[in-house]
Amino acid sequence: MAESAVTKKLGANPTRKEILANWTPEDPVFWKKFGERIAKQNLYTSTWALVLSFVVWTLWATITAKLNMAGFHFSDEQLFTLAALPGLVGATGRLFYTYLPGLIGGRNSAFITTALLLFPLFGLGRALQDPTTSYDTFVLLVSFIGIAGANFSASMANIGFFFPKAHKGLALGINAGIGNLGVSLIYLTAPLLLGWNLSSFFGPGVTTPSGMMYVQNVCYFWTVPTALTLVLIWMFMDNLPLPKQSPKSMLSIFGNKHTWLMCWIYTCGFGSFIGFSAALGLLVSKEFPEVSFSMAAFLGPFIGAGIRPVGGWLADRLNSGSKVTLVSLFIMLAASIVVLFGIQTHAFALFFGAFLLLFLTTGFTAAIAAYGAFLIPKIFGWSYTNFQSVTPAFYIIIAFTVLTILITYVFYARKGSGIKC
């Protein structure tokens, strides 16, 4: 392959700084000779940092159901509000974090946003060891942990610029898809950490009917990989010169009706995925207290995250993302009804099987509408507080899904809608 103008300019042994200053991934010679290795280093490091962010973002959901067992005395509404707060903060933070890589550089933004995770991890670990810690203190600390959910936007805004168009989709899919597996990872590891006696490192546990429990472990343990990730970011990520995004130009999208329609649809998709992830442990503890569920909780998020690439593949094969979304929404509707029936008949196997199907379909329709992480736990908490039952909450979710099906069909899936997606 003949030398290109860029590779001739760089010479045989350019520095990493010189390569980044002349970044031209669409040049196949540059890409093979210099760009690919650097791009993959950034991708792999960014992906792991994103896994860690999703771990921290949903970490609190694995602890909330254990709070009163650990000596606290919070109401159902307070517990579900605490489970919901990280979703609210994370979703709002994404609106701002999108601009970070362009403003301060990809490596700098990844380093700073990851370092910020250490503060709520240490703070919550300390607060959990003191049963007199006030509810307001937990609100503050749990809200702080929500910034982990905003890291997704900064990560995605950065990593795509490293790759040529032919590889950009795969790179972003790896970054987002594997990153989402952090939700499953925390559900898999939290039960082990809750029962693991690390008192010499992280402090004593509390006695519960099922044995000793060390709630602070879940927070303190993840400070270690967070600190190590900071080293990896500094060593293997780069500040690529990125175009500065204008907030004014971004605001223009809000005048387009399809912005709001797609937000509605994706809230039903990704919002349900992350919202159900946050509320599932509490829901099981309320409705099926006799079930030892901790080690199975990771299955739903694992299925939801792992199926995302399949959803994209199906959309490509059918040449219609709207058809895949519509079918998935119908399955979501059926699964929601079966989940409610499983609760009403107190049939855990039926309830959990339908919940796994819910996670499967939310993986197909996932996107950026993270406010569902706040709304779903809050709806559950409101329902328990006002009706002493979760049934009204599922009526709202079912109605929301029906309305989303109608929006998807009318504007995107039916013939003559005028929109191809």
Image (spheres, rainbow, N blue to C red):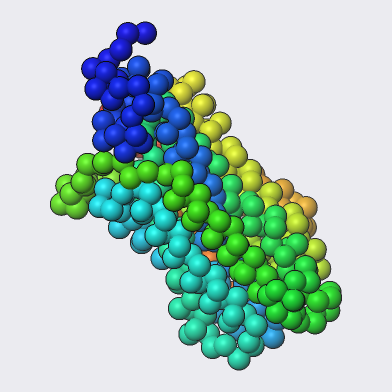
Who is closer to the viewer here, 291 or 342? 291
> In the image, is residue 145 above or below residue 17?
below
- Give the image location of residue 287, x and y in percent: 71, 67
Residue at the (55%, 42%) spot, across then down: 178
Q: Is residue 25 left or right of residue 178?
A: left
The residue positioned farthest toward the top in the image shown = 1
Residue at the (33%, 45%) spot, across then down: 239
Quarter of the image for residue 132 reads: bottom right
Q: Can you see residue 279?
A: no
> In the image, is residue 357 above or below residue 6?
below
Q: Is residue 366 left or right of residue 192?
A: left
| Quarter occupied by the C terminus | top left
Who is closer to the viewer here, 378 or 73? 73
- Give the image location of residue 1, x and y in percent: 37, 8
The residue positioned farthest toward the left in the image shown = 248
Residue at the (24%, 22%) spot, across then down: 9
Residue at the (52%, 80%) spot, across then down: 138
Who is closer to the viewer here, 107 or 373? 107
> In the image, is residue 240 above or below residue 207?
above
